[in-house]
Amino acid sequence: MRRRDFLYMTGVGVGASIMPQHPCFWQIISVEESLTPFDVALKKKMADVRINAAKAKCATLKQLIPAGSCGNY
């Protein structure tokens, strides 16, 4: 196992162990509410905020888009 993978998995494990104890992660919603589509306008607005914040820190668009993602989420 490479060091990078070990640190990643350790972070995931610690994060997962902290989540159940934090009340803001436990929000009970109905099944119908979870199936409703996400507002596309809000999603685009959040993406614009992220891009503008990164550009303010002199990041390029290549740094913002993960390699191999091709927009498939």
Image (cartoon, helix red, strand yellow):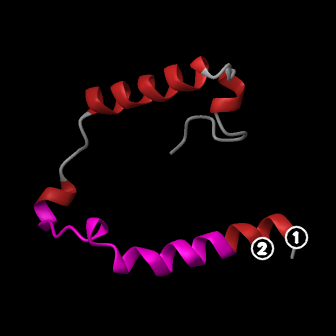
Point 57% across, 77% down: residue: 14
Q: For mark 2, give the secondary structure.
A: helix
Point 20% across, 67% down: residue: 27
| Image vertical order of residue 64 relative to residue 8, above or below | above
Judging depth in this view, the residue of 57 and 65 nearest the camera is 57
Mark 1 and mark 2: Cα distance apart in space:
6 Å
Judging depth in this view, the residue of 36 and 64 nearest the camera is 64
Judging depth in this view, the residue of 52 and 36 nearest the camera is 52
Q: Position of residue 73 (x, y in %)?
A: 50, 45
Are dots 1 and 2 in contact, CB under 8 Å? yes
Q: Is residue 72 left or right of residue 43?
A: right
Residue type at numbered disc 2: Phe
Q: Residues within 10 Å of mark 1 (few under 14, many from 20)?
A: few
Residue type at numbered disc 1: Arg
Point 45% across, 77% down: residue: 18
- The magenta stretch spans which residues? 10-32
Point 86% across, 76% down: residue: 1
Q: Is residue 23 left or right of residue 15?
A: left
What label sits on residue 2 in the rendered view?
A: 1
What label sits on residue 6 in the rendered view?
A: 2
| Image vertical order of residue 5 relative to residue 63, above or below | below
| Image vertical order of residue 3 relative to residue 41, above or below | below
Q: Is residue 27 left or right of residue 53?
A: left
Instruction: Give the main secondary structure of the magenta stretch.
Output: helix
Q: Quadrant of residue 2?
A: bottom right
Confirm whether the magenta stretch covers residue 13. yes
